Amino acid sequence: MRFPSKKYKVFKGECDAVLRAYSNDFKRMAYAFDPRGHFFIINYVFYTPELIAKSGKNKGKISRRSMDLSNLEKPLEDQIFKQFQRYNSEIDDCQTCSVTKRKVFGSEFKIDIEISLGDL
């Protein structure tokens, strides 16, 4: 059994705090969601200033400090669906049928998220 790392817990908490600012958007989409007719489409763009290693043996390569995309996505997805479930208990992350994610260079760490509903 694996336990979440301290870094994971901190990131998850930060995601929760930021996502709460969008509670009206979550509420609107949660009320519009029908599990018999919809699925979720989520697009993530993770901006990181540490994308390319600037020194050492990995200079010019993707930096290990830029984090693994799946390690960035999962705690964020958990917090997104926690927000949805505040308004609609029928919503679950298994109802996500399309996900795109990219990690790109940015002057600061930032995440853009676009969530939409698809028709079944």
Image (spheres, rainbow, N blue to C red):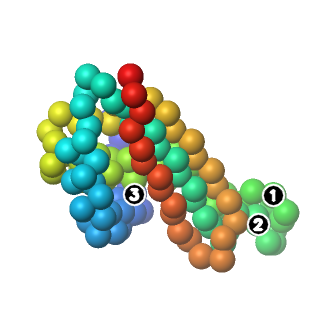
In what quadrant of the picture does the N terminus appear?
A: top left
For marks 3 and 2, give the CA distance.
Answer: 22 Å
Per the rendering, the mark at residue 77 is none
User: Seen from this angle, which residue lies furthest bottom?
Assistant: 107
Q: Identify residue for label 2.
A: 53
Q: Is residue 93 above or below residue 16?
A: above
Q: Are marks 3 and 2 in contact (CB under 8 Å)?
A: no
Residue 6 in view in this figure: no
Q: Residue at x 64, y 55 (%)?
A: 103
Q: Is residue 10 above or below residue 36?
A: below
Q: Residue at x 85, y 63 (%)?
A: 60
Mark 1 / mark 2, whichever is N-terminal: 2
Q: Is residue 67 above or below residue 78?
A: below
Q: Identify residue for label 3.
A: 8
For marks 1 and 3, give the CA distance.
Answer: 24 Å
Q: Nearer the viewer, residue 87 or 49?
A: 87
Label 2 Cα neighbours within 10 Å, binned few <14 / some 14-19 / many ≥20: some
Question: Where does the image place residue 3, in percent across and percent down from the top left?
Answer: 33, 46
Q: Secondary structure at mark 3?
A: helix
Q: Are marks 1 and 2 in contact (CB under 8 Å)?
A: yes
For marks 1 and 2, give the CA distance.
Answer: 6 Å
Residue kind at label 3, given as amino acid type = Tyr
Label 1 Cα neighbours within 10 Å, binned few <14 / some 14-19 / many ≥20: few
